[in-house]
Image: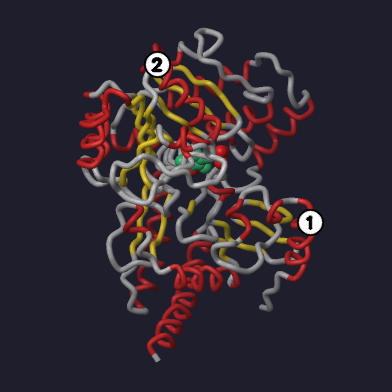
Amino acid sequence: MNFTLEKSATAFAEAKRYIPGGVNSPVRSFRGVGGTPPFIAKAAGSRIYDIDGNSYIDYVGSWGPMILGHAHPEVIGELTEALMRGTSYGAPTLLETELARLITEAVPSMELVRFVNSGTEATMSALRLARAYTKRNKIVKFIGCYHGHHDSLLIKAGSGAATFGVPDSPGVPDSIASNTLTVEYNDAAGLAAIFEKQGEDIAAVIIEPVPGNMGMVLPRPGYLEAVRDITEKHGALLIFDEVMSGFRVAYGGAQEVFNITPDLTCLGKVIGGGLPVAAYGGRRDIMELIAPSGPVYQAGTLSGNPLAMTAGIATLHLLMQTETFYEDVTKMTAALCAGIKAQAEKHGFNFQFHQLGTMFGLFFSETPVYDYASAKQSDIAAFNIFFHAMLEQGIYLAPSQFEAAFMSGAHSQADIDATIAASGNAFAKVAQYYSQQKA
Ligand SMILES: *Cc1c(COP(=O)(O)O)cnc(C)c1O
């Protein structure tokens, strides 16, 4: 066991010559945890393999899509056949109708579906639609929720108060940010207060019903119902951003689990089976406003791409094929969380474990985490030690305390046992760090 990332370090330096920060999405750079990101050569099943010859049990799953594991033979088979028929036509196909049908059957609140290429595009388009439908300009988002990187939603604001948004990034005009109101997740009273003041100007509330982008957080009992009631009362649309939770916490997403009917829903990640697909959809009367049936413009050269549709259809078919898929993988996820929690407790840590379906997360915090402010209480230094100790033992977690983790149908009991054992060693290192700090 001599773990090195020498080749990856060279590759990273080379990448930085041509790509900002060496990566095409910032969190891949390991900026949060330090060190070198492994450069990946291939993936299969529950594992990914880097160019240094290391292999890892993967709980990132390309940040959510790979619910069947990597390179699932049937998905690859369908893709290989599709590839031979050409990669893009820019004209309607049967595949688009088929994937749209599968989605409307899984998520009945989505009566009509429009495909796009990324979650960012889906939420951006859903907001435009909501503004057009309600003829209002403001939107509400929750602090710590991520909906992609377009201007209106790249805003988290510094306090839980109902303040005007402050852009998270230079380049987002204040004039756009000022239309985005923010409030802490799980704070129904805070949301109600915003609506009491500005309800007549609010087009929509966009929410990750089960947030996974501040680490994984769960809704308090009754919270999502309250969000639904408040939006309905004030004539604002409720947009569920289920780009992560859709087909992940359950086949029908968080709206199935919590039995809430949003007006619009955004999907991504799993529905593309590892290819770039996302979608937005919802009530027919709202969606009919989208061009060409209505005046709200939204388009895409590669939208509904035949390869991407093929991967999505194959993935959803496989998810449906095994009736107990979610039950089985949820049980595996619960076993993994219980095992890691026991290892933490063995070292005296009372950390926060969250799980819903095949999605899970761990906060290095001894106090409950239910929103962004409480998530921020986590001990980042301890997480980083844990993260690197796991990586060196061949366990690939997201390189940030503030990300969720994902189980797939390809993970085996042996994978879980190995991960739990590795976590014991990693917690030992964390304990060592704490005792050194005290000394
Ligand atoms: C990943 C994610 C997005 C953004 O999707 P991209 O395809 O990366 O643009 C939006 N919302 C949520 C909840 C996500 O997890």
In this picture, residue 12 sits left or right of residue 373: right
Q: Label for residue 133? A: 2
Q: Is residue 95 above or below residue 39?
A: above
- Of residues 393 and 431, the one nearer the viewer is 431
Quadrant showing the N terminus: bottom right
Q: Label for residue 17? A: 1
Q: Where is residue 82 in the image (x, y as percent from the top left)?
A: 72, 27
Residues packed near mark 2 inside 10 Å, few (<14), some (14 to 19) or many (20 plus): some
> Residue at (69%, 29%) from the top-left corner?
307
Residue, far bottom: 439
Q: Position of residue 170 (x, y in %)?
A: 55, 45
Do labels 1 and 2 touch, CB within 8 Å? no
Name the kind of residue labelled 2 in the image. Answer: Tyr
Q: Can residue 328 be seen in this view?
A: no
- Of residues 202 and 436, the one nearer the viewer is 202
Q: Position of residue 84 (x, y in %)?
A: 79, 27
Residue 81 in which image quadrant? top right
Q: Label for residue 216? A: none
SS at badge 1: helix
Q: Measure the C-alpha gap from mark 1 to mark 2.
A: 46 Å
Q: Is residue 392 above or below residue 114?
A: below
